[in-house]
Each structure stands twice: as structure tokens, then as C-alpha cells.
Image (cartoon, rainbow, N blue to C red):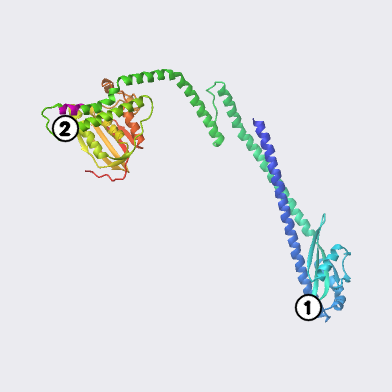
Amino acid sequence: MRSSIKIKFTVGLTIILVIMGVALNLLIRQVFENNLENAIRTSMRDIMNNSREYINYRMIYKRLPFNSQGLTIEAGEISDYFMSTYSSQSQVLDMNGYVLEDGSSLKASASTDKAAKTAKEGKAAISIEHSKNDVKAMLSFPLFYNNEYTGIIIINKSYSDLYSYNNMAINLITFIELSVFLIIFLISFIYLSYIIKPLKNLSNALKSLGEGNYDTQLIVKNEDEIGMLSSEFMNMKLKIKNQINIINSEKEKTLKLERDRKEFFNNVTHELKTPLTAISGYAQMLLDEKLEDPQFKERAMQRIYMESERMHELVLDLINVSKGVSFADEEKKLIDMSKLINEICDDMEIKAEKYFLSFNKHISTGFILGQNNKMRQLVINILDNAIKYSLRDEQIFIETFSEDKFFVLQIANKGEMIPQEVYNNIFEPFIRGAQAEKSSSRGLGLYICNEIVKEHNGYIHIENGEVIRVIVKIPSSGNTLETT
């Protein structure tokens, strides 16, 4: 694997560096060549401007006419001027192209003919010619005075020094470029070896793991993605080992779960006691011959009907829980929690009185967006637990209030502290304490409460101690709670 990656990396990096080097070098050469030609053209323009002023000065100084006759007289001086001042060869021609003075080794050629022709048209022209070790520039321009062309100047100048300096700069940059690319290549190759080493170790560890050696150790020093990959491999190895241990004990757990489910069906009355208590209480009062209040009778019959319907839905929910499926969906509506809690307290007072308990209520107005039946079931389960596990002749404290856009319900009772092993898994199904086992409880009440709270994006917590306090927080909706 390492050799393959190194070969691919070496070939790929070499191709990239060669392409980049060639492209960059060509670009640099083009830039330098353009700069050289621009410098030459600027130099030739300066020579043209200066020489025109010099020739005008000479003609005026010697009182010569500005025509071909005067130019013929001064042609030699002009040619010497270009040679001494600019180290350039020159020709002086009249407007017919006749050479008046030739201070150069220039011979008639296509270049000189073209330069003379351009000057006859009243235009200046600069041409640059490159050779192996030199670059030469030819300048041609007309002499113009009193609206009349009087002659032509052709100058040929070598820029070998500038050409040599330009080549030296290009060669230096090329050398630096090659050195930089070589250093990049070596550093990248060395760093690749550093990267590949942990990959090889990881490959060996994977091979060992595949052979069933789950105690394989992999030392992780990197903090990059490879280090993260190695760490995840170690985590995966531990998880695989744990999963194998879990699979070995899965059969026993599956059998236990099946026994619990069967036992649940035989003791489903745990979750049916609360509505049955309300139904039984109202039914007993209706059977009382001394009861003559028609309004109470009407209310009792309505409550019996409502609790019967709720008991039916509760049975369906409990069956769903036993099958491991979620609660049936119910449309969420705005619920007046103070009204709901007060109604439940009125119903549960009958059971509380049987245990010589009373309610101490501080109910604040509050609204939530939720499922009415589920919230009723939540409050009943918590309140029913408080009644069953309270010390006798005590009060159960019921309080609601607003806190950070949540409707908060707290139900507290004095009782025996919940055993720690039960408390740690209090919201798991089939978790029961000693008192719950005596009362044939299946340990589903708080599990169902937790599921209902999660469905409403809320939070439930139990404070353990001599006072057991259940705290439920549900997002409030469209109201500000005020204590009544």
C-alpha cells in the first residue's frame, strides 16, 4: 500500500511541478521580454526627440537652410553625433531616399528600405530584432521644418548589455524556481512517508482484528484526520468487543424480556387502578340513597363515562407499550393546565382520603399545546404514585408556576427514600421498588410519564430523599402564568 501511494504521489507531484515550472518560466520570460522591448522603445523615442532638437540647433547655429542642401552639409556631423553620444550607427537620407551620409555598416536591405519608406510617409518607426547573443533596434524618422520634410534619419543601435542583464535575471529566476520546486518535492515526499507510517500501522491492526485478535493495540500520536481515524478504529474495536460480549448474553436478556411481557399482561391492572378508583368512588356515592343532589349525580355520571373512555384508551396504550411501539398520535390542542390539574385533584381526593392524606394546592393558570389525554394520564400517574408511597396523615404538595417559558408542575410527598439502584433507572420499563412489588406494580407508570413528557418536548426529574419531589417542565403556549 505504501509503495503504491508513494508511486502515485511521486508521479502526480512531478507532473504538477513540471507543468507549473514550465508555465511559470514561460510567463517570466515573456514578462522580461516585454519589459526589455518596452525599455528599448522608450530609449529609441528619447534618442529621436533629442536628436531632432540637436539637428535644429546645429542648423540654426551654423545658419544653414533647413532643406536637403543644409542637411547634406551637416550629415557628417550628425552621423558623428549619434556614434559618440549613443554608440549607434546611423544614416542620413534626403526625402528621395538618397544616402547623404552613412556612418554605419548598414547595407541596403528589406529592413532599411521599409524604414525609409515609413519615414517618407511622415511616420517614425521602431523595429526590434533578436539574435542569439544580442538584440538590435532600428529607428527611422523624418525631419520636419516649416511644414516641409527635409530628410530622413535611420539609426541602428545594439542593446547587448541590456540583453545580457535580462538573460542573467531570467537564468537566476529559473535557478531559484527549480530550487524551490525541488525543495517542495523533497519536503512533500518526506512528509508523505510520515503520513503513510500510521496508515501502515492501522492496516496491520485491521488485519489483526480481522483474525479475531481484539486486544490489538494501536498507538495514536497524530492529531490530524489520520489520528482521528486511528482513534475511531480503537473505539470501533472496543465496541465490537463489547458487542460480542452483549451477544453472548443476549439470549438470557431476551428470555427475561419475554417473561416480563407475559407477566405484564397478567398484571395490567396496575395502570387501570386510577380510573377504576374514580369510577368506583362515584358509583358508590350514586348508590348512596341519601344522596339527593341532582347536579352532583349528573357530574358523577359524566365523570364515570369519561373515565371509562379514558380507561379504554389507556388499555390500548399499555398494549402498545408492551409491544415496544410508541403511543398513538393525538391532535395537540391548547390545554388549560390549571383546570385539568384541579379536575384530577378533585377525582383523586377520594383515593387520598382512604390513605388519610390531603392535598395542599398552589395552582397557577397556565396553558400548553399538547395532547389532553396524555397530559391527564401524566398528572394522574404522578399523583397516584405520591398517594401510594406517602406516609400516612401527611400532605401532598401540588404546585405550578412559570419558569423560562415553561409550565412547571411539582408534586411532592413525604415517604421512604427510593433505593439507589431503582432511582438510577427510574424511568426504565419494569423497574420496581420493594413497595411496588408488594402492590403488584409492573414499573410502567414513570416510564409512560417520561415518554409523554418527551412527546411534548419537556423535561421530567425526580428529587430523591425524605421528600420525593417530581418536577415536570412543559413548554408553555400563549400565556403568562399568574398565581391565583
Q: Report the quarter where the N terminus lies.
A: top right
281 falls in the magenta region: yes
112 falls in the magenta region: no
The answer to which of 22 and 333 lies nearer the viewer is 333
- Examine the image and state in which quarter residue 130 appears: bottom right
- Examine the image and state in which quarter residue 74 appears: bottom right
Disc 1, SS: loop
Disc 2, SS: helix
| Above/below status of 211 relative to 169 | above
Looking at this view, name the residue that lies furthest to the left.
Answer: 290
Q: Residue 226: x percent and y percent? A: 56, 34
Question: Label 2: which residue?
Answer: 297
Is 471 left, or right, of 157 in this rendering?
Answer: left
Magenta segment range? 280-286
Is 101 left, or right, of 257 in this rendering?
Answer: right
Is 112 left, or right, of 415 in this rendering?
Answer: right
- Asked whether the viewer can see residue 246, the reply is yes
Q: Residues within 10 Å of mark 1 (few under 14, many from 20)?
A: few
The secondary structure making up most of the magenta span is helix
Q: Residues within 10 Å of mark 2 (few under 14, many from 20)?
A: some
| Above/below status of 245 relative to 368 | above
Question: Label 1: which residue?
Answer: 147
- Examine the image and state in which quarter residue 108 appears: bottom right
Looking at this view, name the residue that lies furthest to the bottom.
Answer: 63
Residue type at tag 2: Lys
